[in-house]
Image (tube, rainbow, N blue to C red):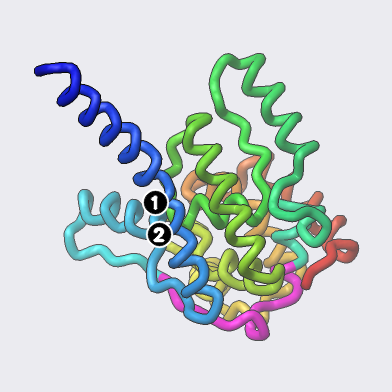
């Protein structure tokens, strides 16, 4: 291959390297704009969960039913904010103090383990990404988070989050979680029930098998104490 041809291929490769990331980000942004007014039918986490369920039982299906913001108990909204992101209304998608703390923990352990993620970051990951931990995936998560915060208000962010977050193996969203664990609608959750659901969120597929785990009980009590002070949109 002569130098001129090689030069053309190098220029094409560099151009492609610039275009592909921009196109990917535009694809994310397009969906985020669409979901400002339309509810997501499925998320990346839901698709991964469906594959996991189907591997064990081809007939298995996810459980999820969308309910609007007004039909979700304020107790659950406050409990989730208290447990997952106490500064939800104050930050613009990222809690840098929590991120710094998580980074220090990861640095000591030598690998990315501790998240330090806000509700907005968790939603970005749930909508588009996988649960695999890496610094590259974290960077993409941050970009998506900023897009979400720019396009949606806090009420919409919390509404979508509560409808798509996983609450057990194949159980997604507040309505199915409320029915599965307590036999009530999401609108009727008591403070105690809401705190219990919020306490499960760090590892719902673990806690669904260990309902009496000391950590879960302690976390439930902690969220219940903080619930009245939690600020929601």
Nearer to the camera, 199 or 111: 111
Observer able to see residue 124: yes
The secondary element bearing badge 1 is classed as helix
Compare residues 120 and 66 and report the one nearer the observer: 120
Query: Could you say whether the residue bearing mark 2 is in a helix, strand or loop?
Result: helix
The residue labelled by disc 2 is 27
In this rendering, position of residue 161 left or right of residue 128: right
Seen as rendered, the residue at the extreme right is 229
Q: Nearer the viewer, residue 8 or 83?
A: 8
Residue denoted by label 1: 24
Q: Is residue 117 above or below residue 180?
A: above
Image height of 30 relative to 219, above or below: below
User: Is any atom of residue 179 visible in this view?
Assistant: no
Residue 71 found in image quarter: bottom right
Magenta region includes residue 192: no
Residue at (48% x, 37% y) in the render: 137
Residue furthest to the front in view is 4
Residue for point 15% across, 25% down = 5
User: Contact (CB < 8 A) between labels 1 and 2?
Assistant: yes
Magenta residues (range): 64-77
């Amino acid at each position: 291959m002569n130098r001129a041809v090689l030069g053309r291929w190098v220029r094409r490769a560099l151009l492609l390297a610039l275009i592909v990331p921009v196109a990917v980000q535009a694809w994310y942004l397009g969906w985020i704009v669409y979901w400002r007014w339309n509810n997501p039918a499925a998320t990346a986490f839901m698709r991964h969960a469906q594959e996991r369920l189907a591997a064990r039982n081809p007939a298995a299906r996810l459980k999820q039913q969308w309910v609007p913001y007004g039909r979700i108990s304020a107790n659950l909204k406050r409990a989730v904010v208290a447990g997952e992101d106490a500064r939800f209304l104050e930050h613009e998608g990222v809690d840098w103090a929590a991120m710094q703390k998580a980074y220090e923990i990861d640095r000591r352990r030598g690998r990315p383990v501790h998240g330090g993620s806000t509700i907005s970051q968790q939603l970005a990951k749930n909508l588009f990404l996988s649960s695999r931990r890496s610094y590259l995936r974290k960077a993409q998560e941050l970009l998506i988070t900023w897009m979400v915060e720019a396009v949606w208000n806090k009420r919409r962010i919390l509404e979508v989050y509560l409808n798509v977050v996983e609450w057990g193996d194949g159980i997604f969203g507040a309505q199915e979680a409320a029915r599965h664990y307590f036999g009530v609608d999401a609108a009727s959750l008591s403070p105690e029930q809401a705190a219990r659901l919020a306490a499960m969120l760090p590892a719902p597929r673990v806690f669904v098998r260990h309902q009496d785990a000391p950590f879960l009980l302690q976390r439930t009590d902690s969220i219940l104490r903080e619930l009245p002070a939690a600020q929601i949109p």
